Image (tube, rainbow, N blue to C red):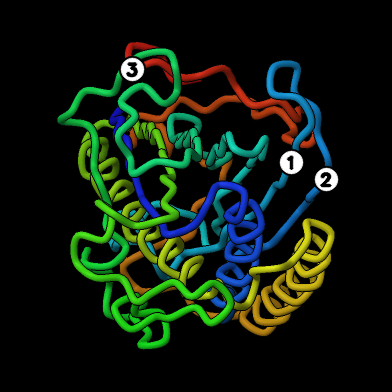
Amino acid sequence: MLMKEYRICMPLTVEEYKIGQLYMISKHSNEQSGGGEGVEVVRNQPDTHPQHGLGQLTEKRIYLNSKLPSWVSVFVPRVFYVTEKAWNFYPYTITEYSVSFLPKFSIRIETRFENNNGDNNNVFGDRPTPAESVSHLDILIDPIPDKHYKETEDLSSWVSEKTGRGPLVEGWRKDSIPIMCSYKRVQCSFEVYGFQGKTEDFIHRNIQDILLVGHRQAVAWTDEWHGMSLEDVREYERQIQEQTNSKLKSTQNNNTAAPRPAYSRSMSVTDERSLKKMGVKTMAMSDPSTSTLPHSTVRLNSTPE
């Protein structure tokens, strides 16, 4: 299991980002959906946690076949999606990713938001993260994939008319007011012989790109969401989710007869011989709809569930 902690600062307050985060996730998911791939929202409902209190539970299916490297695409089924379950107890959130036919694959992300510049070395309160496992991401200067770059989201020229903030300049995290940090402890595991190291590295590279793009967009779109109430952004979220689900299902229906690439083959989730060749033990998976509470925190020396 590979664990890293990412720290991403923004020129916002934690209270402001409560709205900005919800707006950004909905709009970003809609933008990334199309061509039979993207994000389908399965449920989005209030949820109560015994420790963290009242929050929001969201379950999504993320379809992303074309975004996989060829060495992963070889053994995934034609219709492939990752299940995301997120518990939002703002300013603390938990997100878990799983794949039903790969029980040894898991990603868990714990997030805490604080009004500082990323200098809290024990933000989760259980143990300090080793310095070598901490990555400070800069939404201004750190590179993102060319396909995600948009001039309107370039924070070196961004100016918010509503807040008077921007543009950002190099070194902005030292004296920006306001400033907040998104602390994310990411633990991923793919315990399949021959694929573990390569897959876990691939996951972390993609998570880093997603974090940079998402947090850049939250800032760049400030004037779109700033001033919204929680009720306003929940209604926006509901409307966008309907659009996203409709867009995704429409393109999937049109592409059901799409041919499989020559280098790959479709694999049934019950194809035990194929799974055993990969070193995966098949197991009966529980119905995700029957459980709403997140798993307990995964430790580095734990055996993945």
Could you tell me if the residues under marks 2 and 1 are in contact, i.e. CB atoms within 8 Å?
yes
Q: Secondary structure at mark 3?
A: loop
The residue drawn where x is 79% and y is 36% is 289
Decide which of 219, 4 is in the foreground and name it: 219
Could you tell me if the residues under marks 3 and 2 are in contact, i.e. CB atoms within 8 Å?
no
> In screen coordinates, is 259 left or right of 149?
right
Residue that protrudes farthest toward the left in the picture: 132
Distance from Cα at disc 3 to Cα at disc 2: 31 Å
The residue drawn where x is 49% and y is 78% is 160
Q: Give the x, y percent position of residue 188.
A: 37, 34
Residue 268 seen in this snapshot: no
From the image, tell me which residue sits under label 3.
300
Q: Secondary structure at mark 2?
A: strand
Image: 183 above or below 172: above
Quarter location, residue 230:
bottom right
Dot placed on the residue nearer the N-terminal end, 3 or 2? 2
From the image, tell me which residue sits under label 1.
57
Q: Give the x, y percent position of residue 63.
A: 56, 62
Tell me the kind of residue under disc 3: Leu
From the image, tell me which residue sits under label 2.
45
Image: 188 above or below 154: above
Decide which of 118, 1 is in the foreground and name it: 118
Q: Secondary structure at mark 1?
A: strand
The residue drawn where x is 75% and y is 30% is 292
Q: Give the x, y percent position of residue 77.
A: 51, 56
Quarter location, residue 54:
top right
Decide which of 302, 229 is in the foreground and name it: 229
Distance from Cα at disc 2 to Cα at disc 1: 5 Å
The quarter of the picture where the N terminus appears is top left
Dot placed on the residue nearer the N-terminal end, 3 or 1? 1
Tell me the kind of residue under disc 1: Leu
Tell me the kind of residue under disc 2: Gln
